[in-house]
Each structure stands twice: as C-alpha cells, then as structure tokens.
C-alpha cells in the first residue's frame, strides 16, 4: 500500500506543479530568461525530458516524505500537511534561494519555484497523511 501512497502523493505534487506553472508561466519565463519563440513559448516546451525528471523528482520527494513521516510517527492528515509545508519551506526553499542567489537569478524566480516546492510538498504530505 505504501507504494501506491507514494505514487498518489507524487501525482498530487506533479499536478499542483502543472497548475502552478500554468498560471505563472509568463512570469516564470520572464524570470528565467529562457529562449522563447515568437509567441512567447519556451523553445523546449515540447521536450519530454524535463517532465520526466519532474515526475521522477516528485516520486523521490514523496518516497522520502513517507520515510520521514513514518520515522517521526506522523500519521494524521493535519500533521502530514504541516510536515509537507515545513519540508518545502525550510528544506527545499533555502536550497533554491542559495543556488539562485549565487547564480544571480531574480528573487521572483525564487518565489515562483519556492512556492511550487512548498505547495507540492504540502499536497504530497496531505495525500500521505490521508492514505
């Protein structure tokens, strides 16, 4: 059952990312400075590799969250939701902020990608806590 829980948590985080970046696409493209076509779409929009890596990453995060939650005795939906938020906010975002700051990336990019890390981790945690 834990494998299914992890898969569903990963799908929730991945789905959240799809919605998050759909709404923030123009801001994200501007903040990243990536090359776009005449319509403003990223040149690599149809490339499958980033999507595969994104889903694999969601699986890894959900699997580690399951392990951490089990070790910490987190077994209710509200504890898991809070745990997911804290993992995103205090583990993922600081790493992003450090890397992006040294790379000279805009603060807006930290906020967009950090928001995804927090929201995706929160949803993954919630799913793990419910199942």
Image (cartoon, rainbow, N blue to C red):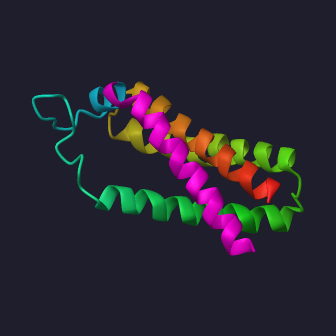
Nearer the observer, 10 or 71: 10
Residue 44 position in % (x across, y down): 20, 48
Image: 105 above or below 85 = above
Q: Which residues are magenta?
A: 1-26
**Any magenta on residue 11?**
yes
Q: Is residue 121 left or right of residue 83?
A: left
**Residue 120 pos. (x, y %):** 59, 45
State the image quarter where residue 103 is shown. Answer: top left
Characterize the magenta stretch by its predominant secondary structure: helix
Compared to residue 82, the image places residue 49 above or below, namely below
Q: Is residue 12 magenta?
A: yes
Question: Left or right: where does residue 62 sit relative to residue 70?
Answer: left
Give the position of the C terminus as an image quadrant: bottom right
Residue drawn at x 85%, y 44% as measured from the top left = 78
- The quadrant the N terminus occupies is bottom right
Q: Quadrant of residue 64?
A: bottom right
Q: Image height check: is 59 above or below 44?
A: below
Residue found 40% across the figure and 34% down from its top:
22
Residue at 15 percent of width and 28 percent of height: 39
Q: Which residue occupies the foreground of this view, 18 or 56? A: 18
Residue 94 seen by the camera: no
Q: Is residue 40 visible?
A: yes
x, y percentage for residue 63?
Answer: 65, 67
Q: Position of residue 86 (x, y in %)?
A: 72, 43
């Amino acid at each position: 059952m834990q494998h299914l829980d992890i898969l569903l948590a990963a799908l929730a985080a991945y789905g959240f990312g799809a919605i998050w970046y759909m709404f923030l696409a123009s801001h994200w493209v501007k903040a990243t400075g990536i090359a776009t076509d005449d319509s403003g779409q990223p040149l690599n929009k149809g490339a499958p590799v980033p999507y595969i890596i994104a889903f694999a990453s969601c699986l890894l995060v959900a699997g580690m969250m399951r392990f951490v939650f089990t070790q910490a005795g987190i077994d209710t939906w509200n504890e898991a939701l809070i745990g997911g938020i804290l993992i995103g906010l205090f583990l993922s975002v600081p790493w992003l902020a450090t890397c992006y700051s040294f790379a000279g990336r805009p603060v807006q990019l930290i906020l967009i990608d950090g928001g995804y890390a927090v929201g995706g981790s929160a949803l993954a945690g919630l799913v793990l806590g419910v199942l």
